[in-house]
C-alpha cells in the first residue's frame, strides 16, 4: 500500500493503481518493480504537508494494488484501461504507478482530458518504435488520439520525425532550459481538463538514475515539483512512470514525492 | 568479442551468437545484458585448458556478435533462426548466448538434433505461459517439435501439467539429487545427435544468483560441468541462457566457463 | 502478500505474519526489509509442489501482513505475541517472517511447543548481549522458558558461556558436519510438539549472504530443506528470520523456499 | 583515522569522535557504518585548502576513533556525552561523526552552545517518535534543553505539531528556497556561541542518497558548504550525521568534505 | 562499438579509441571498465541531435575499439600515442575514452594543440605523485610539454605546489563558481588549435559518482556541456576519462553524452 | 584494527599487516580495499573458538595497520618486506592481508619457509605476465626463489608453460577434486617450516565472488578451512590475498574466518 493511502475504495477521491508493465522498456529493464519501489521509498514521508496544511491520510487516497502485467501489451493496456475507467466513473482521480510509459495511454483514454501534460526527456511522438506501435516511445503520440493537445516539459531528445511532428499546433515542447519561463507564465487551461504524466527521466540522471534510459541535462526536482503544483488543479488524472530498481532509491523517492505533491496540490485547490 | 574467439567466420568451427532477448523474462529482467556480461567475465580465463591440452584460440571459435533483439518474439526468433541456420550450413557449431530461454527454440530448429539435453531448474514444458506460447517457460515443449526426445537435468519445479507432460516417453527428467547417478552412467547417444542448452538457473542460486528466477536446491557448478563434458561430443549445438546482470558476476563467470568447457570437450572429442 | 497466500484469515490453516524488527541486529542491519524481500523473491515459485503433489494455493495460507515494529523491543514482542496467540487460538499455524531473531521468542510463547528446533549458525544462548536481554543473541535462551528442550542445528559459534550452557540436558547442538547424521536418524518427537525456527545464517554465506552476521562453514540449502521436511510434521509454529536486503536475493529466495517447504511438508503429513 | 587527523590527543584543537549509533534509524538503516565510510571517502582529498591557504594536517585534528554503540540509547548518549565533555574540557572542538542524529544531543550538552544551528531536511522537533523520546526525530527538540535557540536550515518537512513548535521564538526555520537569502544576510551571533549539526539529508537526495530518509527538494552541496563557512567561526562544536552505506559514496564524500570545510573555516577565523 | 560509430576507419572524421588504463588510479579503481561502460550507456541516445540538426551516424565516427592496457604506463602511453598519431595523420579527430587521466598525455602529444582545455576537479599539475611522474595527477603538467597553455575549468583542489604552478602565465584556472562567467565571455582561440580533455570528476559527484576521486562542489552537467559546445570548434582532439563502474551509470551516461555533444558541435561548426 | 587483535606490538605472537597493493590486479580491481573489508566483516565473529577452546583476544594478535601502497611494485615489495622481517625478527608470525597476491613474495622472503603452501585457483608460476615479472600471476614462481618447494592446492588453471613448470619436482599441484584425498593423508612437514598463502579465489566463486578473477569449480569453504587446520602448525607465516569489495561480503567474511582459523590452529598446536 502506498503509505497513507488508507481510504476505502468506495470513499476514495484518489485511487493508486500499479501497472508494472515492463515489456518494451528500452535499455535498462526493471520498471516492473517501479510500483513497489515507489511505495517503499514513500514510507518515510511525513503525513503532514506544511505548504497546503493538509494530512495525506485525510485526502481520501486508496491504493488498489497492482494490475498484474503480462506480455501482450495491447491486451494488457485494454484491461488496465477498464480498471482505470472504473476509477474515473466512481468520480475518483486515478494515480497510476508504472511500469513503462506505455501504460499512460489507457489511463489517458480513461480520464479523457483535453490537454495531455507530460514531464519527459523524450518526445515519445513516434508512430512506432522498432516496429512496435505499443512501445513506450510512442505514448505521447498515442495520447493525442484522445487529448486535443500535448505539452511536453523537459523534452530534450527525439528522432527527426518526432521533432517534425512536434512542430504541429497540437504539440508544445518546453525544453529543459525553458521550463522556468514556462513556470513563470503557465498557460491557463480555462475550463479545459488536463492529465499529468510524469516520466521520471525528465529529471537529470543525477536525481533519478533508476530509469530505463537516462538522458543528461534534465530538470531539477524542484522544477518538476513546480510543474506538478502548477498543473494539478486542472487535472483529471496523474501518473508516474519509468521508475526502476537500478539505483539507490533516488528515482523512487522523487517519484513518490511528486505523486504526493500532486495529491496535496489537487486537493488543496479543490477545497 | 568472446575472449579468444579470434577465428574468422569462414574458417570457424564454432560461432558465438548473442541473442539478448528479454521480453518474456519472468520476475527479474536483465537477460538482455547476458551476452555482454558473459563475454566480460570470461576475460580472465586462461587460453590453455590443461585437461584437454588445448588452447582456446586454436579451436576455431568466431564471435559473430549479437543479433539485436526487438519486442516481437516470434519474428525475432524467426530471424535469429535464419542466422543460426547459416552457421549450421557452414558446418560450424552454434554457441548461442541468451537472452531468455526462448531463443533456444530457433537454435534447436536450426541445429536439428535428435535429442534435446537441457540443464534447467524448470521443466519449461508449458504450451503457453500467461497466454504466451513464446514464453521462455515453453521452450522445452517447443524444442520437442524438432527433437525426438528431451532430457532435462537439474529440473526441480514445474506446474502439475508440466510434470504430467514429463511422464511421456519422450521426456526424461533427472532431478538435482539424481544427476550424479546419471553422470555415473550416462546414456550413449548412439549415432543420434544432441543439442545442449544450459539455463543457468539449473545451478543453485548460491552459484548463479544473476538470473531471472532463482530456484534453490540446484546443481553445483561441477555437476553442470560434468554434464557438459559428458554430452559435448554428441552435440551439434550449444547455448547458455538466462544470465542477467543482477549479481556480482557469479552467473556470467560460470556461464562463460561452461561455454568454454563445451568447446574444449567437443573439440577434444572431434580429434 | 506472500505469493499464493490467498486464503481468508478465518479459513486459514497457516498465517504468515511479518515482524520487521531490526533494533538489536548486530553488524549489518536491514532485517526490517526481510518480510517484504522474502515475499518478493517467492514470486517466481511454481504453485505446484511435485514431491507432495499439492498446490500451494490450496493449502489455506493467509498473509496477515506485517506487525509494524518500533524501538521498544519488549513492548513490541509483547504485542506481536498477542497477534500470534490469536493465530494459534484460531487453530492455525503461525509462519513468522522476521525481522531479527528476537521475534521468535513471542512466537514460541504463543505456539507453546515442547521442543524448540532451530537452524542457526549461532547458539543464541546468552542471557544478555551487550547488556540487552532482548537481543537476538539471547533468543534460544529465551525460548527455553517455554520449551522443554532446544535442538540447534548447524550451530558453529558462541561464547564460552553459551557452549557451557549448551552442555545441559535440555540443549542439543548438532554442528554443521553432524547434520547429515542427524538427518539419517532424526529424533522421533513422540507426541511432543515442536516449533521450527530458521535463522537464515545457518546456511553457508555463499548461499545466504544477505544476513546480519555471516558465519562461514555452514549448511547447504538442501540440508536445511531436509531438516524442514523432517521436523515439519511435529510443528505447531514456524519462523524464518534474519534475512536482510544486502545481497542479490539469495537469502530471501532460500528463505521463502524453506517456508513453502514447511507448508508443503506440514500439510502433506496432516492429510 | 580521518585522513590527515594526525595530531595527538593532547595537542589537538579538534577531535574527531565516531558515534555509530543506529538504533532508532527510520526506514533505511546503516548509519552505524557512517563514521568509517566518511573516513574512507575522505582519503582522496588534498591536504591543502586553497581558499584559506592551510594544510589540514597542520590544524591539529585528532581522530579518537569510535565510541562503540550499544542498544540502550539513553545510556549510550550519556556515555558518549562524557567522552565529548572531555574533549571540550581539553579546549578542543569536538567533530562528531554519526550515527543517527540522536548523538547530537549529548554533543550539544557537552559543547553547551547558545545557538544550535542545524542543516536538516527535518524539523526533528518531536517530543517523541513512536513513543521514543530518544529518537533521531526528537533531536532538535532535545538540544533546545541546552541551547537558547535553534536555526534549522533546509528543513522542508515535519508533523503539524513540529511546525507549530517551530513557530515559537526560539526556533527559526529557513526552508530550502530561503537558504540563499539567509546566506546573503546571515545573523551575527554577537558573542554567542554556536554548534553546527549537519544531517546529511539536508542535501537533495541526488547529492546524498546514502541516508536513512531521503527527502527531495533539498539543498545543493554548495549551499551546505556556504552555511558551514558562514557559521564555523562562532562554533564550539560540529557534527555530521545520518550518513549510511546505501549509496555509491556520494553522502560520505559530501559529509567528509563538509567536516573539512568546517575545520578550514573555523581554523582560518581563529587565526 | 560506440553506438552510431558506424563509419569505416578510412572514411572516418572521428575515431573513438578506448584506453582502459587503470594502474595509477587513486582511491577507487575501475576506470579500466570506463570505455565499455561509456559505450553501453550511450546505447539509448537518439541518433538525431535537434540543436544542430544532424544524425550521429552521418558524421563519420569510427570506433577503433580499445588499445588493451598493461602495467608499464610509459610504455603503454608510448604505444597508445602511436595509435593516436595514426588517427591524426589520417586527418581524423581522435576521441579517446579512458581509462585514467594519464592517457591524455600521449593523445595531446599526438594531436599537438596550441591550447590544452581541461574539465577537471583537480589541477593535475604535479611533477610527480607518490614518486610517479606518470600518475594521472600529473597529466596537465605533462600536456604543457606540448601545448603552450592550459585552461582548467571546474578545478577546485590541488596541492600548494600545484596552485603555485597555476599562477604562471601558461595556466588559467577557472573555478566552478567562475565557469558561468567564463562561458559568457569565452576566449577566442584565434587561429590556435585546442584539445579538450574531460575528466568526469569535474562534475559534482551527485552527477558522476562513478569516478576514482569524487570531489564535491563541482560543475553541473549543463555547464560541462556548454564548455564542450564552446570549445569544440577549435579542437583537434577530445577525450573523456576517469569514468569507472562504481555507480548506477550516471558517470558513463554523462560522459557518453558529452562525447556526442563534442562531435555534434565540432561537426556543425566544420560545415 | 582486526577485531580482537588487541595485543601490543611488543608482546604480540602474531602481527596483522595490511598490504593494499592493487597495481597489477587482472580484470576486476579493488583488492586495495581488501584489508579494511576483511577487518570489517570479521567484526561479528565470536571471540571464543569452541574447537580449540581459546579466546582470540588471548592469543597475542596485534594489528599493525596497513603499509600504504604506491605504484612502484618492486619498491613497495621491498619496503613491505622490511616491515615483515621486523615482525619475524621479533619472533612473531606475520599475518599479511592483501592486496594482490604479489605481496606474498616479500612475506615469504621475510619468513623464509622451507615449503610454500598455497590455496589458489591459479598456478601463479609465470616468469612474467604481460611483460611484468612483478605481476600477481608470478608470485608462486617468485616464492620458489626462497622456498624449496611449493604445494598448490585447488589450482585449476594456468598457461601451458605454467603446467609444464608444475611438472618439476619442487612443485605439487593438488587440483580441487584431489584436495579431499590430500587432506585425508597430508604430508608431514618433518621439521621443515611452511608458509601458508590463501588466495581467496581458490574458493568456488559462489563462496567468494569478491575477487579479481573468479574461476569456477573451486574449493568449498570447509576444504579451505581444513587445509588451514592441517598446515598451520608448521607455519612461520600466513597471508590472505585477492579479496576485493565487489561482492556482498562473502569473500571478506570467508577470508577473515580463515585467518582466525589459522591463528586458533597455530596457537593450539604451539601449546
Ligand atoms: Mn516517456
Ligand atoms: Mn522518457
Ligand atoms: Mn529455462
Ligand atoms: Mn529455468
Ligand atoms: Mn539467531
Ligand atoms: Mn544466527
Ligand atoms: Mn535529523
Ligand atoms: Mn533529517
Ligand atoms: Mn584529472
Ligand atoms: Mn580529476
Ligand atoms: Mn594468486
Ligand atoms: Mn588466484
Image: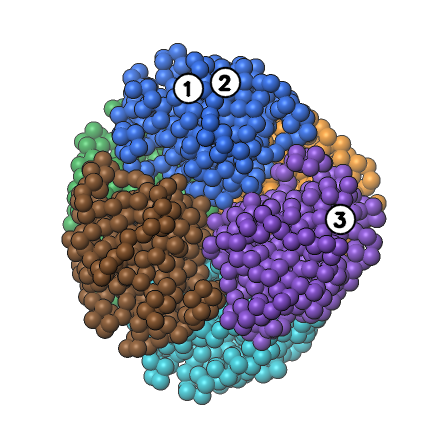
Chain colours: A orange, B blue, C purple, D cyan, E green, F brown
Chain to which mark 3 belongs: C
Residues at marks 2 and 1 on the same chain: yes
Q: What element carries label 1?
A: helix
CB of mark 2 within 8 Å of CB of mark 1?
A: yes
What is the count of numbered marks? 3
Note whether F144 is above or below B173 in the view shown. Answer: below
Q: Counting residues from the N terminus, which is met first, the one under dot 2 or under dot 1? A: 2
Residue C264, x across and y down, in percent: 69, 42
**Residue located at (49% from left, 58% from top):** C215
Residue hosting label 3: C14
Residue hosting label 1: B234
Residue D132, x across and y down, in percent: 67, 72
Residue hosting label 2: B115
Dot 3: within a 10 Å radius of its alpha carbon, few (fewer than 14), some, or many (20 or more) residues? many
**Residue located at (54% from left, 65% from top):** C26
Dot 1: within a 10 Å radius of its alpha carbon, few (fewer than 14), some, or many (20 or more) residues? many
Whether residue E116 can be seen here: no
Residue B91, x across and y down, in percent: 36, 13
Residue F93 in the figure: left or right of residue A90: left
**Residue located at (56% from left, 78% from top):** D77
Residue C22 in the figure: left or right of residue F179: right
Mark-to-mark CA distance, 2 and 1: 9 Å
Dot 2: within a 10 Å radius of its alpha carbon, few (fewer than 14), some, or many (20 or more) residues? many
| Quadrant placement of the N terminus of chain D | bottom left
Residue C216 numbered mark, or none:
none
Q: What element carries label 2?
A: strand
Query: Mark 3 or 1, which is nearer the eye?
Result: 1
Whether residue F219 can be seen here: yes
Chain to which mark 1 belongs: B
Q: Nearer the viewer, residue F86 or A138?
A: F86
Q: Nearer the viewer, residue B191 or C82?
A: B191
**Residue located at (78% from left, 63% from top):** C82
Amino acid at each position: 500500500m502506498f503509505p497513507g493511502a488508507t481510504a476505502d475504495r468506495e470513499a476514495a477521491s484518489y485511487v493508486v493503481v500499479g501497472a508494472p508493465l515492463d515489456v518494451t522498456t528500452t535499455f535498462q529493464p526493471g520498471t516492473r518493480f517501479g510500483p513497489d519501489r515507489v511505495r517503499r521509498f514513500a514510507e518515510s514521508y511525513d503525513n503532514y504537508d506544511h505548504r497546503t496544511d493538509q494530512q495525506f491520510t485525510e485526502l481520501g487516497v486508496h491504493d488498489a494494488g497492482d494490475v498484474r502485467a503480462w506480455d501482450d501489451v495491447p491486451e494488457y493496456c485494454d484491461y488496465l484501461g477498464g480498471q482505470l475507467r472504473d476509477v474515473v466513473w466512481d468520480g475518483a482521480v486515478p494515480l497510476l504507478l508504472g511500469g513503462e510509459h506505455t501504460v499512460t495511454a489507457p489511463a489517458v483514454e480513461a480520464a479523457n482530458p483535453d490537454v495531455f501534460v507530460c514531464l519527459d526527456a523524450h518526445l515519445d511522438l513516434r508512430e512506432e518504435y522498432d516496429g512496435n506501435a505499443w512501445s513506450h516511445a510512442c505514448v505521447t503520440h498515442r495520447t493525442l488520439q484522445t487529448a486535443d493537445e500535448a505539452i511536453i516539459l523537459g523534452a530534450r531528445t527525439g528522432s527527426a520525425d518526432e521533432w517534425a511532428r512536434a512542430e504541429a499546433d497540437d504539440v508544445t515542447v518546453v525544453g529543459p532550459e525553458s521550463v522556468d519561463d514556462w513556470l513563470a507564465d503557465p498557460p491557463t487551461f480555462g475550463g479545459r481538463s488536463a492529465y499529468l504524466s510524469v516520466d521520471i527521466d525528465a529529471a537529470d540522471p543525477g536525481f533519478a538514475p533508476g530509469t530505463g534510459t537516462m538522458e543528461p541535462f534534465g530538470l531539477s526536482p524542484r522544477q518538476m515539483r513546480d510543474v506538478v503544483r502548477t498543473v494539478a488543479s486542472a487535472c483529471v488524472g496523474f501518473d508516474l512512470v519509468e521508475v526502476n530498481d537500478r539505483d539507490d532509491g533516488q528515482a523512487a523517492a522523487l517519484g513518490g514525492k511528486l505523486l504526493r505533491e500532486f495529491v496535496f496540490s489537487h486537493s488543496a485547490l479543490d477545497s
